[in-house]
Amino acid sequence: MKLPAWLRPWWPLFKRLHRFVTLMLGIGFRRASPVLKGNGVPTTSSDWSRETAAAEPDNVTLHPGLPAVVLDRTATAGDPADHWVFAEAKQAMIPATFTLEVRGGSLSGDYGATTTPGKRLDHETSTYFGVSDWREHPVFLRPTLGEVEHVPGTVLSLTTRGTTSNYYHFLYDAIARLGVLEDSLPDARWDAVVVPHQTKYQKAFLELIGLEGKLLEPRRGLTYRADTLLVPSNPNWHLEAPQSTVDWLRKKLPATGTMDLPKRLYLTRGDLPNTRRYVEEPALWPELEKRGFHRLDAGTLTVQEQINVFAQAEAIVAPHGAALTNMTFSQPGVKVLEMFPATYVHLGLWSIAQAIGADYRYLVAEGVEQAGRRNQGVLDDVSIPPARVLAAVDEMLG
């Protein structure tokens, strides 16, 4: 659910309250679960899927995929130089991939919580934003798993947090898990797939990727129980955009042609407050237009058109937002300038830039230092003097 614009500045407080309420409610709901039997909430959890498989070997099998990888990233140009968020991310561990096979497994909610027949929550395949303790998982906000629908045969899960409403998360946390399945269980077959498919871009991605099987829409208050549940691990759960994932997406979703658009793109987020829009866009845009940029609202294009446009782009300027996900399809060496508010510097799109070999740089607005506090201003607008932006653009183009 999206907050109204006037409530968005309060998001960090709402998140803390959400976690606390979940923690408190879960204590009681887990105690009542044995009485509720089939639709009771999980009573315990494993932090790692290998622990889930070890705890219930008759019900759960872990099929390994690619091994863990340590990434050593190149230094990133930007202003201010050596921003602490980028400095901390120079090295990253990409976890090993796998597919979890759960006989009699359940998949709950639009966040895709995986539960075994022994009422064990597999936390590794059920991650949620800002939640490190499984007791704070939103599956414990309800006294039960809600309506339980049995789905005969084998069910594939491509659902996790954020995939129902965000372009970036749908591509990297839903579609990309098909690549994990290919690596870990290449001969897998399934009868149905739990995956969001209500929006135009979701339907388009699923069609372009050639996904087969009956589609089941995930939603809060609904649990699908399968004879066999297949849950590929999320290769992007730390928002690292692993090289293997990016390469797989580029291979499976190629450009099919070119469009009559300039090769310099400015990605607009409109003018609605508290949406990470660039506040000074009216003053900046005429100067960017003089430099040959085209103002693009990516949401007005089809998915294939977005792939095609970004595949031919040579320079991209944008406030942080999901439209930059399409950088996945750009050519190595594409020049990218990403703008952030002081309170929210997010590395998800920078990780994609690293994987494709982009010439990437950042601009962070002046403001309250957020050192050590991530995601505090997740919906804050970006306000940077146009002269500062233009100086960075000219340096990038030069």
Image: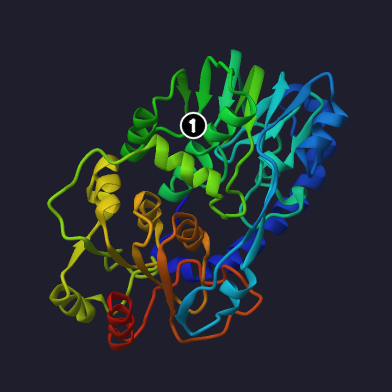
Looking at the image, which residue is at 81% across and 43% down? 28
Mark 1, Cα crowd under 10 Å, few <14 / some 14-19 / many 20+, is many
When asked about the image quadrant of residue 257, the answer is top left
Name the residue type under label 1.
Val
- Residue 44 appears at what percent x and percent y? 83, 38
- Residue 377 appears at what percent x and percent y? 51, 71
Dot 1 falls on a residue whose secondary structure is: loop
User: Can residue 368 be spotted in the picture?
Assistant: yes
Q: Is residue 215 above or below residue 344?
A: above
Residue ranking furthest to the top: 152
Relative depth, front residue between 111 and 78:
78
- Residue 312 appears at what percent x and percent y? 25, 53
Relative depth, front residue between 153 and 182:
182
Looking at the image, which residue is at 31% across and 37% down? 200
Relative depth, front residue between 10 and 171:
171
User: Can residue 164 be spotted in the picture?
Assistant: no
Q: Is residue 193 left or right of residue 133?
A: left
When asked about the image quadrant of residue 199, the answer is top left
Type of colouring: rainbow
When asked about the image quadrant of residue 283, the answer is bottom left
Q: Is residue 119 above or below residue 87?
A: above
Task: Point out the image quarter for the C terminus.
Answer: bottom left
- Residue 57 appears at what percent x and percent y? 84, 23
Q: Is residue 36 left or right of residue 157?
A: right
Q: How many marks?
A: 1
Q: Is residue 355 above or below residue 108?
A: below
Q: Is residue 74 left or right of residue 21?
A: left
Residue ranking furthest to the right: 55
Q: Which residue is mark 1?
A: 195
